[in-house]
Amino acid sequence: MPFVCRFAVVLTAFIALCSVGHDAYAGDCNPQWSSLPESPDGWVFTSLVFDDGSGESLFVGGIFANIGELPAQNIARWDGETWHPLGEGLNGEVTALGVFDDGSGEALIVGGSFTMSGETDLQHIAKWDGSNWQPLGQGLNGTVRGFGTYDDGGTPLLLVGGDFTQAGGDQALSLAAWDGEQWQAFGPGFNGAPRTFVTFDDGTGEAFYVGGDFTSVGGVEIKRLVRWDGTNWERVRFDGEYGFNSRIEKMMVYDDGEGEALFIAGQFTIAFGAPGKRIVRWDGSSLEEVGGGTNQRVRAMTLFDSGEGPQVHIAGDFETAG
């Protein structure tokens, strides 16, 4: 069985799958933990590895006030030896981290329920330039839940999903795009928050996939997963069924040795009408539950190579997997 334990920093369960695909576990997996000298005094909701000019570091966001004796309001940077605050921090929870190049170079983009950093007005989304917090226009009027990047060959767009109805003062129902200078709505409007974005080819051509809390797009029933082909929003179908019965939290494209596939994780138990306990693998022609699934929600998923090749790592509310 894969290794399962409590992950102190995020106050949640964490698991690393040594092998995924048809065999939930193959070979020996001997993960070991090493503790950091201090941990945040609250919850960590999101993390990202990025170099903001200070060297590659792990950025963490959530709800916390201090890391040890270091004041760090809801966001901090770990350089491998020391924790660092990011300016004056943020006055509300941090729920999403991303990277976007607005033409001036890649920068860390942060989203959440915050509205300020010190005296700087940010309105739920901000750019960290390595030294200071900068607003993205007028921001959004609700909490940000996820980021993605979309490029159709024109100007790259930062896509932002969340619990908002306006972006830059104009209507944008739960999904908006930032081009580096201004906001615009992206699509006809979602009735719930998009949380995760990937580009994937299911065998019918490359398309942009969006997953989250929503059950309709533009008034059409979708059930938490939708496909954008560059012109139209479409239901994602498999074996005559479409959608998931509960929230999709994370998606990623990964080749596990059996070809490139879309890994989908969240709090669902039904995927495309079939059993799938919170994490599934779908390649357009087959669907399978990954490693027996988990007993509670998966909140985060990423690839990490600890020296033995890339492995799927997941974190969430679960206590058992497989």
Image (cartoon, grey):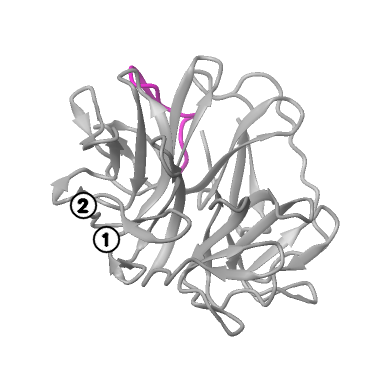
Residue 192 bears which disc, if any? none
Q: Answer above or below: position of 94 versus 65.
A: above
Q: Residues within 10 Å of mark 1 (few under 14, many from 20)?
A: many
Q: Answer above or below: position of 262 versus 244.
A: above
Q: Are marks 2 and 1 in contact (CB under 8 Å)?
A: yes
Q: Over which residues does the magenta segment extend?
A: 282-295
Where residue 168 sits, quadrant-wise, is: bottom left
Residue 173 bears which disc, if any? 1
Residue ID at (42%, 46%) = 196
Q: Amino acid at mark 1?
A: Leu
**Viewer-closest of 223 and 9:** 223
300 within the magenta span: no
Task: List the residue tagged with mark 2.
Answer: 188
Residue ID at (64%, 74%) = 89
- Image coordinates of residue 185 in percent, x first then y, are 30, 56
Q: Residues within 10 Å of mark 2 (few under 14, many from 20)?
A: few
- Image coordinates of residue 219 in percent, x first then y, are 13, 51
Which residue sits furthest top?
258
